[in-house]
Amino acid sequence: MNKTLSLLVFGLALLAAGCSSTPVKLDVDPEIDFTRYKTFDWLDDRPGVPEGVKAAMSQYPVVDRRVRGAVSGELIAKGLAEDQVDPDVLVAYHVGAEDKIDVTRWGYRYGDPNAVWGRGIDVYPYRKGTLILDVIDAETMHLVWRATAGRAIEENPVQAEAGERIGQAVEKMFQAFPVR
């Protein structure tokens, strides 16, 4: 599978095996008073943002629309309004995928007369997809909140469910977002 198609499949399949088992990691700046944040905008919409940031976030339009829609919906539900002129916070996301290997030592094996007890090992290659959401203080340009979710990517996802799966993952990521 070529790199472009692989990343597109990643975006569409992100967390496709179900969000309930998707591990989410959070990092929140404890010194920040989140009650002062009332508005948000997207980092790549701001003037002066390097082209590389803009290109990374808009490389896959279908994935971009799904992530932005889900994140905007969660921020609005938390009481923030979108403001493209003078936002309090800026939002960015990053997606990535990497090849991984899962090795399981069973200690035994069935059906193989040549197997030696204690040496049953299964090796499973897979691709792990990751979605990172960042919330940045627009005045100081310091990261104040980060959520990361990742899991194995299905080879042939059901694309009709991809938007729903991304939405569920983003919802889970925002469960612990500081509320005003």
Image (spheres, rainbow, N blue to C red):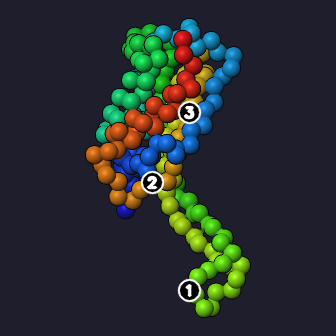
The first of marks 2 and 1 along the sequence is 1
Depicted 22 relative to depicted 38: above or below: below
Q: Residue furthest front?
A: 110
> Where does label 1 land, which residue?
111
Give the foreground label among 2 and 1.
1
Frontmost residue, 26 versus 39: 26
- Which of the 4 quarters of the picture holds residue 119? bottom right
Depicted 62 relative to depicted 68: above or below: below
Q: Is residue 59 visible?
A: no
> Where does label 3 land, which residue?
147
Residue 113 % position (x, y): 60, 91
Depicted 65 relative to depicted 139: above or below: below
Q: Residues within 10 Å of mark 3 (few under 14, many from 20)?
A: many
Under mark 3, the amino acid is: Ala
Secondary structure state at the residue bearing disc 3: strand
Mark 2 to mark 1 CA distance (whole Å):
30 Å
Q: Residues within 10 Å of mark 2 (few under 14, many from 20)?
A: many
Mark 1–mark 3 contact, CB under 8 Å? no
Mark 2–mark 1 contact, CB under 8 Å? no
Instruction: Return the mark for residue 153.
Output: 2
Mark 3–mark 2 contact, CB under 8 Å? no
Q: Residue at x 39, y 35 (%)?
A: 167
Under mark 2, the amino acid is: Ile
Q: Residue at x 63, y 67 (%)?
A: 104
Under mark 1, the amino acid is: Gly
Q: Residue furthest right?
A: 118
Mark 3 to mark 2 CA distance (whole Å):
19 Å
Give the foreground label among 1 and 3.
1
The first of marks 3 and 2 along the sequence is 3
Q: Is residue 118 visible?
A: yes
